[in-house]
């Protein structure tokens, strides 16, 4: 089967929906999503959207906070544009009918979060901002947009002249389908499920990253993984995110005996940048000492944080105790598919927006509530640019590729790691605190699963579960190899054997991954390249 569209969007989070809602009516737009629009990270997002809307605030202050959190690894110009566009994005959404939270005076209610110098976090429904935004954007989708749920994209279709022409996808019953498009946009999110502890939706397994890498796109900054400090932690399992806004409202991290653990660690204490807080909690847990979030000083907690309260109830944690058991877990990938300011990759016809992309705005560590903002800004920006591009190609232009699924390659019997073992070993060896020996061990273990062979294997005849495991293997290897190569600590990348920032050798240096084409269309891994 074959379908054709002007714009094909893979993923259905904030970036994807913002893009789709921006695209003009005379474009044929298809959105393919692995799950449903209500099961992704965007829908679950409790945090808000950062924008300099306060009387004393300014986009330049937001800019400086973003650079500080990103440890100056950011693309400064990209950050400047992001923070400048933020107020207009929020005001535009509000005027269009998106329901944000207002104070008694009728002004947008602005909250405080870690590493921000001003109150600038806009929320919807308290701690249900993602839900509010997703539902609003879905309501804005016109009849020219088709959303197909439960469609698993497993390959980007490349032409002989190295242009992306479409995708191959699988349906739950195992049947394959081909979708052709002039413009293919990856908006698949990050790779949180590579880790045993994560705030991410079950569907976030690094698909878009692996798809892009296999097709020859450039990936950068894969070592920079943000671990959220406070996931609810019950019976050795993380149960869901406890928003940073809880600490913004005065909650403190304490030991069993009530000792404040962030005292003397950082000037911002419990609102220090996420890598600092995560590492501090991690050290206590390693010593067998549980850590709690003391919420006893927050009035009307259930009303203020309905989503967190619901997660606690479902997990058997009683809010009346005033203490929530917490652990850090993987939350956000700062790196990803390298793009320009519009979301264009190094491959013609292929774009990336949202967490799967690396635009340079987050640097080595994302500032709280800049992720939904990035999705909104880049979704709109790419949408406006695509609206100015040419119309749909004639169907005949695709005839030469219609046979793409007619001769499936023979299925190879290659080994794959157990998903749960991969998640645990990534947490242990390529997690919050890293060091050479453990990283070498993890890289070697990942490569033992015929990694080089998987990169050259047709996935047509494999099941969705098997392909998902392949993508996790590839993405885990990229993260681990980059973490091994970067011999310093910066932002979300912490090396116990290189505990400080090494500006002389590493400031503004990016580790780039790209497979180059050999004769006959095959690709090979090139050695890690550094770029500034």
Image: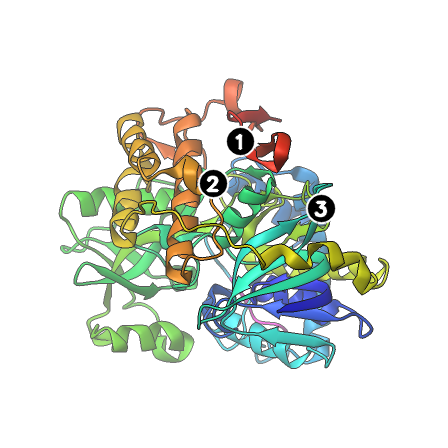
Span of residues in magenta: 107-111
Q: Residues within 10 Å of mark 1 (few under 14, many from 20)?
A: some
Q: Taking the image as drawn, is residue 378 in sight?
A: no
Q: Is residue 47 left or right of residue 63?
A: left
Residue 379 marker: none
Residue pictured at 19% horizontal, 71% vertical: 321
Q: Is residue 475 left or right of residue 84?
A: left
Callout 1 secondary element: strand
Residue at 41% x, 32% y is: 481
Label drawn at residue 524: 1
Compared to 22, does 260 lie above or below? above
* Residue matched to label 3: 163
The numbered mark, 1 or 2, whose residue comes first in the sequence reads 2
Compute the Cα span from label 1 to label 2: 8 Å
Identify the colour scheme used: rainbow
Check the image and name the residue furthest to the top: 504
Image quadrant where residue 225 sits: top left
Image position of 129 (left or right of 27): left
Q: Position of residue 197 (x, y in %)?
A: 30, 54
Q: Are marks 1 and 3 in contact (CB under 8 Å)?
A: no
| Residue that carries the numbered disc 2 in the rendered image | 455
Mark 3, other Cα within 10 Å: few <14 / some 14–19 / many ≥20:
some
Q: Position of residue 32 (x, y in %)?
A: 58, 67
């Amino acid at each position: 089967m074959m379908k054709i569209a002007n714009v094909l969007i893979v993923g259905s989070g904030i970036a994807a929906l913002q893009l789709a809602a921006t695209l003009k009516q005379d474009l044929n737009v298809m959105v393919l999503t692995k799950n449903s629009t209500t099961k992704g990270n965007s829908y679950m997002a409790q945090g808000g959207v950062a924008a300099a809307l306060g009387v004393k605030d300014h986009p330049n202050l937001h800019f400086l906070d973003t650079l500080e959190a990103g440890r100056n690894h950011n693309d400064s110009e990209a950050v400047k544009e992001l923070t400048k566009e933020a107020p207009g994005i929020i005001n535009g959404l509000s005027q269009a009918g998106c329901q944000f939270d207002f104070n008694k005076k009728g002004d947008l209610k602005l909250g405080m979060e870690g590493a921000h110098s001003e109150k600038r976090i806009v929320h919807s429904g308290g701690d249900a901002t993602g839900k509010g935004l997703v539902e609003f954007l879905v309501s804005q989708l016109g009849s020219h947009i088709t959303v197909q749920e439960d469609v698993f994209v497993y390959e980007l279709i490349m032409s002989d002249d190295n242009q992306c022409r479409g995708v191959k996808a699988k349906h739950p019953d195992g049947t394959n389908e081909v979708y052709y498009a002039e413009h293919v946009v990856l908006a698949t999110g990050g790779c949180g499920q590579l880790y045993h502890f994560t705030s991410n939706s079950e569907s976030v397994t690094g698909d878009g990253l692996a798809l892009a890498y296999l097709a020859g796109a450039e990936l950068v900054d894969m070592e920079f993984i943000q671990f959220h400090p406070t996931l609810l932690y019950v019976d050795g399992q993380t149960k869901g995110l406890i928003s940073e806004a809880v600490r913004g409202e005065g909650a403190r991290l304490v030991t069993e005996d009530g000792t404040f653990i962030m005292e003397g660690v950082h000037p911002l204490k419990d609102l220090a940048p996420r890598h600092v807080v995560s590492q501090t909690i991690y050290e206590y847990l390693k010593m067998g000492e549980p850590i709690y979030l003391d919420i006893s000083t927050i009035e009307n907690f259930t009303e203020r944080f309905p989503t967190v309260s619901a997660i606690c109830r479902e997990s058997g944690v009683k809010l009346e105790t005033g203490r929530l058991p917490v652990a850090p877990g993987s939350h956000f990938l700062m790196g990803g598919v390298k793009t320009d300011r519009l979301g264009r990759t190094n491959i013609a016809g292929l774009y990336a927006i949202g967490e799967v992309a690396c635009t340079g705005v987050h640097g080595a560590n994302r500032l709280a509530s800049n992720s939904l903002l990035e999705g909104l800004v880049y979704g709109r920006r790419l949408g406006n640019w695509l609206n100015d591009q040419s119309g749909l190609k004639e169907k005949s232009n695709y005839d030469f590729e219609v046979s793409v699924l007619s001769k499936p390659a023979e299925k190879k019997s290659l080994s794959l790691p157990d998903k749960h073992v991969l998640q645990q070993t990534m947490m242990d060896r390529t997690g919050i605190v890293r060091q050479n020996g453990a990283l070498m061990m993890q890289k070697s273990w990942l490569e033992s699963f015929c990694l080089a062979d998987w990169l050259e294997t047709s996935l047509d005849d494999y099941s969705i579960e098997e392909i998902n495991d392949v993508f996790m293997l590839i993405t885990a290897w990229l993260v681990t190899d980059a973490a091994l190569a970067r011999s310093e600590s910066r932002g979300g990348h912490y090396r116990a054997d290189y505990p400080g920032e090494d500006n002389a050798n590493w400031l503004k240096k990016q580790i780039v991954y790209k497979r180059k084409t050999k004769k006959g269309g095959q690709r090979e891994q090139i050695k890690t390249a550094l770029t500034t």
